Amino acid sequence: MSESLTDCRTILANISAYLDGELETTACVAIEQHCRRCTSCAALVSGLRETVGLCRDAASATLPEAVRQRARERVRALLDRESRKVP
């Protein structure tokens, strides 16, 4: 973090809201300006943006039926085991 530590800490504190589009326009502009000057924060924002995109893509992927069936069976077994525990 080559710029002012306070600016970098502000980025870190607000990065989730920034990537989720929850910040006011002025805050977004400030983050973008800071990232043009600070390569560390720019890399962090870029990496997290890519990670969020990959997670969103993975969430929309359909699992094969065999995997889904094994998961259901495993959850049922865990629930059965938990229900047999004595309080």
Image (spheres, rainbow, N blue to C red):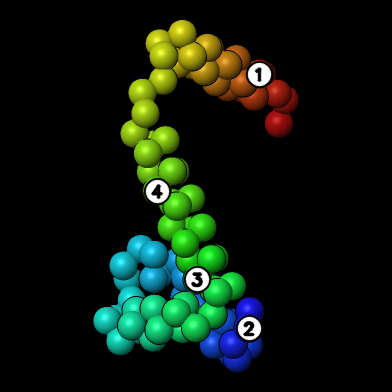
Q: Which secondary structure lies at badge 1?
A: helix
Going from N to C along the chain, the mark reached first, 3 or 1, is: 3
Going from N to C along the chain, the mark reached first, 3 or 2, is: 2
Q: Which secondary structure lies at badge 2?
A: loop
Nearer the viewer's eye, disc 1 or disc 4?
A: 4
Residue position for label 1: 81
Nearer the viewer's eye, disc 3 or disc 1?
A: 3
Placement of 6 over or under 45, stated as above or below? below
Residue 53: mark? 4
C-alpha separation, residue under disc 3 versus residue under disc 2 = 11 Å
Residue position for label 3: 42
Q: Which of the 4 quarters of the picture holds residue 24?
A: bottom left
The residue that appears at 38% across and 43% down in the rendered structure is: 56
Going from N to C along the chain, the mark reached first, 1 or 4, is: 4
- Amino acid beneath label 1: Arg
- Amino acid beneath label 3: Ala
User: Which quarter of the image is occupied by the C terminus?
Assistant: top right
Question: Dots 4 and 2: beta carbons under 8 Å?
Answer: no
Left or right of residue 48: residue 33 = left
Nearer the viewer's eye, disc 2 or disc 1?
A: 2
